[in-house]
Amino acid sequence: MTVMSYLGAIGAAQREAMDADERVIIIGEDVEANVYGTTGGGKSRSDKGDFLQRYGKNRIRNTPISEEGIVGAAAGAAMTGLRPIVDLSYSSFLYMAMDQFVNQVAKNRYMFGGQASMPVVFRSAMFYGLNTGAHHSDRPYPMFMNVPGLKIIAPATPADAKGLLRSAVDSDDPILSFEACLLWSSKEDVDENEFWVPLGVARTARVGTDVTVVAISSSVPEAVAAAEELAKEGVSVEVIDPRTLVPLDRDAILRSVAKTGRLVVAEPAHRTCGAAAEISALVAEEIFDSLKAPIVRVTAPDMQIPFSPSLEKQMYPTKATIAAAIRRVVDLPALQPVAAAV
Amino acid sequence: MAELTRDTLREMQLRMLRIRAFDERASKMVKRGHIPGTVHTSIGQEAQVVGATMALGAGDYMSGNHRSHGHPIGKGSPLGPLMAELVGKATGVCKGKGGSLHLADFAVGSLGESGIVGSSIPIANGAALSSKVLNNGKVALAFFGDGAANQGVLYESMNMAGVWDLPMIFLCENNQYALSTPAHTVTSGIISERAAGFGMPGIRVEEGQDVLAVYDAVSEAVARARAGDGPTLVEVMTYRYNEHSEGLRLGTDYRNADEREAWLKKDPIMLFRHYLASQGFSDDELDGLEATALAEVDAAVAFSDASPYPDLSVAFDDLYTDKESAA
Ligand SMILES: Cc1ncc(C[n+]2csc(CCOP(=O)(O)OP(=O)(O)O)c2C)c(N)n1
Ligand SMILES: [Mg+2]
């Protein structure tokens, strides 16, 4: 075990994957100079050019700023023997390549009757909460959940970032990894040996009996903090981190809610048609009779991300808004007016 | 011009005949409701398709577009599974999941046809990137129309292929119309000349109905790619005889009848037949090729007719590598 940051763990996974298989390449804007911190050293952001020296220009490739061309080329490369990891930097840039994601990456295996293999990972960082304005702050994973054929991961801890990325690189299905910048510097003990976190298996971040909080990405640590606070008042909160959004570990969610009878879902994406909406619908459809209280979603509202820090910090689930939602489902009086984001 | 064996010359004519016979049959089958949806035929463009596909090696890759039957046929795909795919049978080359717009036969390097105009160009570029990284000597070719030549992704791809010296051929099938729109009304300048902006050779084959002219131009581009000298843009001037898609009846006459007549006089199959006759092929032999192509199409239809439709139980197959993820 060694202490790794979330970003360092991603770098470590990339290094392991590059070492393990010659067919793995990394392409993206500014990857050669390690601008985004995952093509450098193993533990933290380190010397620039580290991967470039180690693996050479054939396997570490700077691209032009041509997202559509990059994503399509990565798909074509994956169909013909490579296993590319594509660093798309900001998740808002995925829109530039929407046609390639939806019409080629997601559809080719099915459309061609299984002839195409699509072993490619598209990594992008969600830069929300950092006052970068509306164009750089998106959390677009729900719209990709609506595209059959893609698999989607959203790690919330350094260990999951490392283990899920290894599984993603080894998968013959296309994977989109949505990483949260707010988590980049979070640290924990991570196995420095190779390990794989299986896709489609949720993690129970905290065990509890009264309420289930399903939390996604940076909402996970907020949910755990809220759970700890409520524990002091005698409310036992279970926190489930799906980790993989497609395929979703439905059983883990249903098992937990069947046990607790109460569900709060917290995520940083927009409210309408978000992952929280899907998870809520799943529980309502499958185990309605187990519910002791209405489901509550804690999400970002359906609006643009404002620049000013005083406005932006209200946008995403926090310990306080998640705690308020938990109070609601267990019928505790609210401590303070429930914030707009609930 | 390359010295071609008699076998190669014969094969060129046979593949052009196969495409014509296949598409003429497909057109009929659409009109009779035997093929669901619609098809886009390559009738009239056979020289351009066969000249390009036969310039590629067996292991080379290609991607294509909606006008898509000719590409795999030109690359040597057997006709039965292609026809079964058009009909939607379980024995189709894509198990009935793709249809006319999405033929693919990875066994011959056909990485798939795209219904989205321009969308498959970067797929071939990626195949060329594979070849480069894996150093396996393969080249890749993207077929696209004059209409697709105005999609931005082409230029992203040309730039990437140029800067990375990819073994890549961008092949523009300029049949002078994108659906009802004459290319010159929406295209600034000459498509092949755009190559200069990316520091790559741009070649226009004016005699695109001459299979040997196309073959020579593409062969040169393939040789350059294989030698590590990077990509080429080849624009081939050609003409489609049929409507944009079968069964489409447009109210306006956007093409003029004289123009069509003039192109019919340069029919690629007829031209090449004359050439082959001048090279000592007998009438019997040339008639025989036509009969062979028709018989192959008959057999393909019979194969399709005898094949079952896919069972509902396979509907989710190949969505993901594992069945559990498709729930
Ligand atoms: C992105 C996109 N836009 C529009 C269409 C509708 N469409 C299908 S084929 C076509 C014309 C394409 O012309 P061209 O690329 O020259 O190919 P051709 O049909 O002439 O072979 C159009 C407009 C489409 N399928 N995809
Ligand atoms: Mg055209």
Image: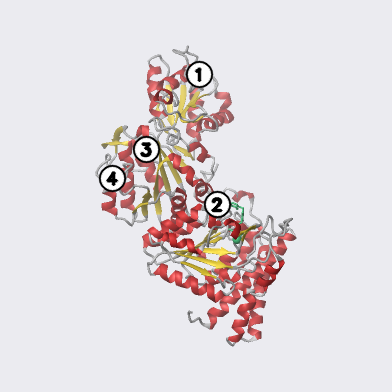
Q: In 3D space, how far apart are the residues under numbered discs 3 and 2 (Cα atoms)?
A: 29 Å
Provide residue B9's location: percent of width, then percent of height. Answer: 55, 79
Disc number for residue A160: 3
Q: Residue A328 vs residue A230: left or right?
A: right
Q: Residues within 10 Å of mark 1 (few under 14, many from 20)?
A: some
Residues at discs 4 and 1 in contact (Cβ within 8 Å) = no
**Mark 1: secondary structure:** helix
**Mark 3: secondary structure:** helix
**Mark 4: secondary structure:** loop
Provide residue B228's location: percent of width, then percent of height. Answer: 37, 67
Name the residue carrying label 4: A40
Provide residue A318's location: percent of width, then percent of height. Answer: 41, 24
Sooner in the amino-acid sequence: mark 4 or mark 1: 4
**Mark 2: secondary structure:** helix
Residues at discs 4 and 2 in contact (Cβ within 8 Å) = no
Name the residue carrying label 2: A110
Q: In 3D space, how far apart are the residues under numbered discs 3 and 4 (Cα atoms)?
A: 19 Å
Establish whether labels 4 and 2 are both on one chain.
yes
Ligand 1 falls in which quarter? bottom right
Disc number for residue A329: 1
